[in-house]
Amino acid sequence: MNPPNRDQPAIWGCQSAFAIPVILTFLLAVLCLSFVWGFSQTISLSRNFSQAYRDPSGYWGDSQMGTDGCPDRIATAGCLVAAFATVLDYYDVRLSIPAVSSSTGIARTGMDPGILNDWLRTHGGYGACSQDPYGNCCLEWTELPREISLSSHENRSESGIDVVARQIIDNALRSGYPVVAGVHWGASCHGTTTRNEDCHWVVIVGKFGQSYEIIDPYNSDSSRQEGIKTTLSRGVFGNYIIDRYVVVAGSAPAIRLAKVNLVSFFKPGGLLYPGETIQGLLKIEGTRSPLLLYARVTDPRGRVSYAYYGSPSSTILSYTQQKRSLYLEPRWFTAHEWEWTRAIVNDGQLGTWTWELWVEDVARPGLRLGYDISAYTVAEESTEAFQPAISVLLAVGITAMIITLIYALGMAINNG
């Protein structure tokens, strides 16, 4: 830095001397505010779920909850199931549902509110509760998957969070444990019942100062699988006051070196015909090493195998019963979006095919760093597929004939 010009007022040295105390004062103020307002801690979730999500078939929002005739559906009463599905996914808990027990009629493996609900229905996860007129509709907390443990507490403040509850929640977040909390936001639940607590369930995932970050499992956009990331004071239904809350502990989730999201797997509607092309896209972030991509396929007969390409230039998929990566060599996924396959649907088995996708780090085999599941149906082509086009052509032809007749009639009248 050049020295100050002697012909200019001698203020340069004073500014430098003044800058150090100002910076120190600012840092001290920030430090003090951090003690006044609290700490900053956020749990990183790879996915979270909305209870209201519906795909074209209605899954999972329209799925029936409980047993013995329980009338509830996930979309309207499944906030707690969606909250626990989010937490179980955070701990990399995967459940397998056979076709006979699946609300979709298809065998499924993974974690989402529909899978968890089907698992609870067949594992004694629902019991009777006073607010439901009939059926077993209430979650049995002791029958959740054994990979997690619960510690239940109550908030004793009617206007916020009491000192003890705040300390417990803060310690849980510091340890990387999400907190599932029952909340209310007014004199009664939704204004339609006399209940005034545990009206809704959310997942507390972070804290910045005195504000707690949550995942609200209710998203009014039923086309979105994700819940709403917000704060307790700005919940979907209003300013949330915690009633009961549960610290959910489990084995520390694996370091997610990559995030995998299946963006597009088949054309809208999921119906394919022999000879058409299926396409898959992956969104992968944070890759630090080469990865192996796996595709486990369940065919319409329920047989499970691994899809793979026999050579780097091949576009024909082969299948084997042994675990084998889709591509024989590990790959660096550097782009945020990457097309993983363009495969032609063969004219083999008609029916529904289910694909499970995940990646593994070559240095840590067996550890899934991302997971997704999807399905499509191969149907036999028929003339029904062309009926709309035929109808349009017929309508156009008839209209043209009518116009021609009217024109000819008009010309005849004029000539007459």
Image (cartoon, helix red, strand yellow):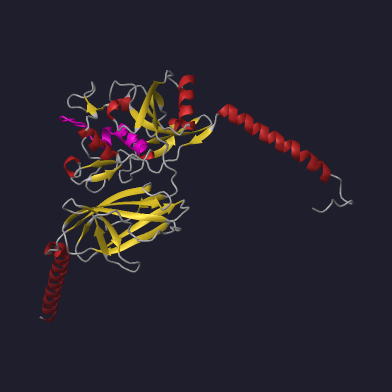
Q: Residue furthest right?
A: 7
The image quarter containing residue 292 is: bottom left
Please check the rendered image and state whether residue 107 is part of the magenta-colored stretch, yes or no.
no
The image quarter containing residue 268 is: bottom left
Give the left or right position of residue 200, taking residue 213 as reference: left
Give the left or right position of residue 274, taking residue 219 as reference: left
- In this rendered view, identify the residue nearer to me: 294 or 185: 294
Give the left or right position of residue 183, taking residue 408 as reference: right
Query: Residue shown at 46%/54% (left/top)?
Result: 289
Q: Is residue 376 visible?
A: yes
Q: Position of residue 251 (x, y in %)?
A: 40, 35
Q: Residue furthest bottom?
A: 415
Indicate the quadrant containing the C terminus: top left, top right, bottom left or bottom right. bottom left
- Residue span colored magenta: 65-88
Q: Position of residue 313 (x, y in %)?
A: 34, 69
321 to 394, vertically: above or below: above
Query: Residue shown at 63%/29% (left/top)?
Result: 32
- In this rendered view, identify the residue nearer to me: 210 or 358: 358
30 to 269, vertically: above or below: above
410 to 22, vertically: above or below: below
Q: Residue furthest top?
A: 156
- In this rendered view, identify the residue nearer to me: 163 or 356: 356
The image quarter containing residue 247 is: top left
Query: Residue shown at 49%/20% (left/top)?
Result: 163
Total number of numbered discs in the rendering: 0
Give the left or right position of residue 248, taking residue 140 as reference: right
Please check the rendered image and state whether residue 73 is part of the magenta-colored stretch, yes or no.
yes
